[in-house]
Image (cartoon, coloured by chain):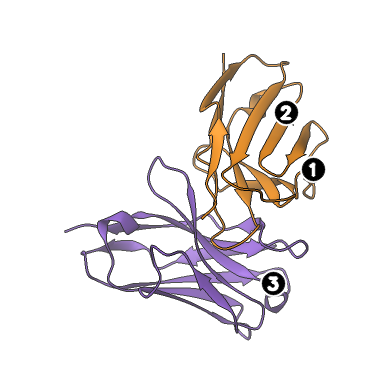
Chain colours: A orange, B purple
Amino acid sequence: EIVLTQSPATLSLSPGETATLSCRASQSVGNYLGWYQQKPGQAPRLLIYDVFNRATGIPAKFSGSGSGTDFTLTISDLEPEDFAVYYCQHRNDWPLTFGGGTKVEIK
Amino acid sequence: EVQLVESGGGVVQPGGSLRLSCAASGFSFSSYFMYWVRQAPGKGLLWVSHINNGGVVTTYADSVKGRFTISRDDAKSTLDLQMNSLRAEDTAVYYCVRGHLYPPHYFDLWGRGTLVTVSS
């Protein structure tokens, strides 16, 4: 099973700042890595698939990069609605797994 | 409206069974892979099971293999999860999830979830 480790666990930032979230895989997942956003009481929402492709309706402020075992989600110009928990997920093989999440909170 | 609506959650004793259902609408259900993903209270996301379009191929997380069975009825646009031999650690919100068409195995439409509580 591929383990995804996200860091930091919590990121405290102010509106207008840029968030940089990390996801590290225990073995290479190639380019098969996606990102989700989850707000309290809501289901997750797909943001990014295959490292850098934005899902339908996702604004350009969300961008992804990386390959192999190290990946980054960057959220520019943080707005109040961006403060949430973010999860990475791979689709390299079974089982599909998620990272433990990074909470982006208002400083 | 494009949506997934889960039902069937509730409180069940350890060792008991429960059947979750998911009603899909607003899209061509038969074309999509479908999944169940769960989230224990205050915890992260865990993929539980997958079924391909056509219902021929199914996969399960090791933690539920042999206890849970996923199935679909394309004529009714429904997805089910039969859960047997339930354990306390199965307590979670269970989400019915549609797979991204291409590339597959990402989750692009989620239901609101249904809470399963396994407790005596």
Observer-side mark, 2 or 1, equals 1
Task: Please name whichever residue, B8 or A107, is drawn nearer the observer in this view of the structure.
Answer: A107
Q: Estimate the x, y position of residue A4 in percent, counting from the top left.
A: 55, 43
Q: Could you tell me the amino acid type at mark 1? A: Phe
Task: Please name whichever residue, A95 or B14, is drawn nearer the observer in this view of the structure.
Answer: A95
* B101 relative to A3, above or below: below
* A52 relative to B90, above or below: above
Q: Estimate the x, y position of residue B32 in percent, counting from the top left.
A: 69, 72
Q: Chain of mark 1?
A: A
Furthest residue in direction left, as rendered: B120
Q: Could you tell me the amino acid type at mark 3? A: Tyr
**How far apart are labels 3 and 1 at the CA level?**
23 Å
Is B1 left or right of A4, judged from the image as shown?
right
Query: For residue A75, which numbered disc appears in the image?
Result: 2
The quarter of the picture where residue A24 lies is top right
Q: Estimate the x, y position of residue B113 in percent, counting from the top left.
A: 48, 56
Quadrant assignment for the N terminus of chain B: bottom right
Q: Chain of mark 2?
A: A
**How far apart are labels 2 and 1 at the CA level?**
12 Å
Q: Secondary structure at mark 3?
A: loop
N-terminal of the pair, mark 2 or mark 1, is 1
Structural crowding at the residue carrying mark 1, measured as other residues with C-alpha within 10 Å and reported as few (<14), some (14–19) or many (≥20): many
Residue behind mark 1: A52
Q: Are marks 2 and 1 in contact (CB under 8 Å)?
A: no
Residue behind mark 3: B32
* A71 relative to B81, above or below: above
Quadrant assignment for the C terminus of chain B: bottom left
Query: For residue A41, which numbered disc appears in the image?
Result: none
Structural crowding at the residue carrying mark 3, measured as other residues with C-alpha within 10 Å and reported as few (<14), some (14–19) or many (≥20): some
Q: Chain of mark 3?
A: B
Mark 2 and mark 1 on one chain: yes
